[in-house]
Amino acid sequence: MLQIDFSVFPEIKTARLLLRKVTAKDALEVFKLRSDEQVMQYIDKERAATVLDGEVFINRIILSLKNNDGITWAISLKESPQTLIGTIGYWRLIKEHCRAEIGYMLNPAYWKKGIMKEALEKVIEFGFNELKLHSIEAQINPENSTSAGILTSTGFVKEAHFKEDYLFNGVFKDTVVFCRLQK
């Protein structure tokens, strides 16, 4: 079973990025992400309606971190570390199985620049080397070919396609599960 302690937040640096702690100061950018139709197109969650919704989401991130149940990083460029351009993290840690579910989103102005792949590679490395995960899963909408491509390019394989396995806004939706095992 995993022994998790996020009392000291682990910042991660890449060639272009700083993955840092999400703070209350990020509420406006989180709101912009979670209310953007392009960003949320394949994420079947209610859209943020106000900046307060961004604050509520950040409070869930902070509580999850405090309880050692998950960790989410703000994705920012090194040259402007105070500006959140996306998020990435292990939002569900399954400690007894050494497994975690990863999730991410990115401001569309930064799409198709390799930013998410760069962040994902480092967060995978952190998951296997620091958290001692055995496996990482990602659940995506089957129509999200971009996310499927990023996952595949970072070593994930498709494990399952669940038909109409959850209900969102009165419509049953499918889920595709990708997984990567520790090598």
Image (spheres, rainbow, N blue to C red):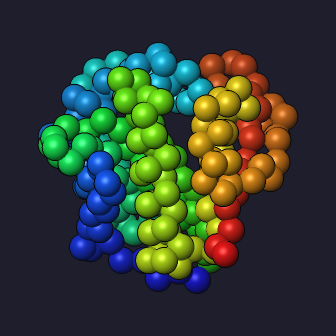
Residue 25 versus residue 69 in the image, above or below: above
Q: In which quarter of the image is the N terminus?
A: bottom right
Q: Nearer the viewer, residue 49 or 158?
A: 158
Q: Position of residue 164 (x, y in %)?
A: 81, 31
Q: Position of residue 63 (x, y in %)?
A: 33, 57
Q: In which quarter of the image is residue 170?
A: top right
Q: Quadrant of residue 80?
A: top left
Q: Nearer the viewer, residue 83 or 122?
A: 122
On screen, residue 29 versus residue 47, left or right, reads left
Q: In which quarter of the image is residue 68?
A: bottom left
* Picture residue at 48% right of the left edge, 52% below the top: 120
Q: Where is residue 53 in the image (x, y as percent from the top left)?
A: 31, 29
* Picture residue at 31% right of the left edge, 24% below the top: 32
Q: Position of residue 98 (x, y in %)?
A: 61, 75
> Is residue 62 among what the camera can see?
no
Residue 15 versus residue 128 in the image, above or below: above
Q: Count numbered badges in the picture.
A: 0
* Picture residue at 82% right of the left edge, 48% below the top: 160
On screen, residue 140 versus residue 46, left or right, reads right
On screen, residue 28 versus residue 112, left or right, reads left
Q: In which quarter of the image is the C terminus?
A: bottom right
* Picture residue at 53% right of the left edge, 79% below the top: 132
